[in-house]
Image (cartoon, helix red, strand yellow):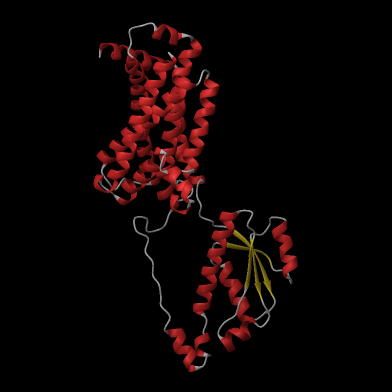
Amino acid sequence: MKVLRFILQKEFRQIFRDKTILAMMFFVPTIQLIILPLAANFEVKSVNIVYVDHDHSSYSQKLINKIGSSGYFHIVAAPPSYLEGMKWVETGDADLILEVPSGFERNLVREGSQKVNIAADAINGTKSNIGNAYLNVVLADFSNDLDIRFKLPPQSASATSSLITLTSTNWYNPRAEYKYYMVPGILVLLLTLIGGFITALNIVKEKEIGTIEQINVTPIQKWQFILGKLIPFWIVGIIVFTVGLIVMYLIYGIFPQGSFLVLYLFAGVYLTALLGLGLLISTFADTQLQAMFIAFFFMMIFMLMSGFFTSTDSMPNWARTMSEFTPVTHFIKVVRLIVLKGSGLQEVGRELLYLFIFAIVLNALAIYNYRKTS
């Protein structure tokens, strides 16, 4: 333990001596956690729509008024034809086209139904899909508000009145605000980037400045060397995680509903696994540039397949299986469950087992590979 204590003293002096690393580890993730959730918002609040009205009736006017007053749509033009409306989409000035056919009001009154044409610009898939969904809700609401049932035959009116009314409730996020979904995930990603990159550069830096040869000729065990590299950054990671939780509460008003003990237990095991990966990368790389590129390769895969941007349930089977072999997937899931839902250790025990396995395997490989290349 005396040898390990000297190694830890050396590592902490190295960390606090480099002001740039200190800023990267503490200041940068704090600023990013404040800014990124404001930008990483999938809610679409401004959809440009072109309204092509071939009917020019009171009902078509009511429809355009309802769309404009919804707060989500901005009617940019009302051209006389669909082809002229497409010019607005081609220039990128419109996201949706709503075409109301002639006889719109007559068919609604006489037959009780009428089809309209919606064309969406799918270049921006997220905006077009969400905008299309918003517009369908507005159309459904418009249809329910009409007094068609009073103008229909008695049998049609009774059929209309027997429709089922659905009422939905959002549990754990009643107002469906994206910040409650995004902030915990961004905190995990920032912790991943800091832990993965900094540790990946650690041993490589020793190689570049030539101190690795001096360490190799000393009576230091390999596990002591790896542990001495891991513990300081593990402590730094826990501090960064704590700062992130404070920012999450002070800036966004998000307070964990579950146990802090369980949350920190997962954070500790996750950091151990992540730092083991960084140390493993540093044993393969000979320069800091190589280490950065290898770490960036893994970080991109972790971020895109973690379920942060796209739910793992919607991924193909091969991608879903691959995502199960990334520790980030499990930690993002756990943080969201504990922070928002208040899940306990019993509900997330399986994820803890996964992270324990990742931690043991990655650190064992780091120790083994360092022994091989020393």
> Relative to residue 139, is residue 358 drawn left or right?
left
Compared to 275, does 222 lie above or below?
Answer: above
Where does residue 321 sit, x and y in percent of width and height?
A: 43, 45
- The answer to whether residue 236 shows anywhere in this view is no
In the figure, 350 relative to 55: above or below? above
- Asked whether 268 or 172 is in front, the reply is 268
- Circle count: 0
Quadrant showing the N terminus:
top left
x%, y% of residue 31? Answer: 46, 35
Q: Is residue 102 left or right of residue 311?
A: right
Which residue lies at the image location 32% right of the left edge and 16% below the top edge? 224
Residue 162 seen: yes
Residue 147 percent location from the top left of the image: 51, 84
Residue 10: percent from the left, percent from the top?
Answer: 36, 13
In front of the other: 24 or 153: 153
Which quadrant would residue 2 be assigned to in this image?
A: top left
**In which quarter of the view is residue 44 placed?**
bottom right
Residue drawn 59% across and 55% down? 125
Q: Which part of the image, by quadrant, shows the C terminus?
A: top left
Between 35 and 203, the one lying in front of the other is 203
User: Residue 5 vs residue 274: left or right?
Assistant: left
292 or 55, nearer to the observer: 292
Left or right, 84 with respect to 256, comes to right
Q: Residue furthest bottom?
A: 154
Residue in the picture at 36% in, 30% down: 361
Query: What residue appears at the point 42 percent right and 29 percent down from the top-left corner?
Result: 277
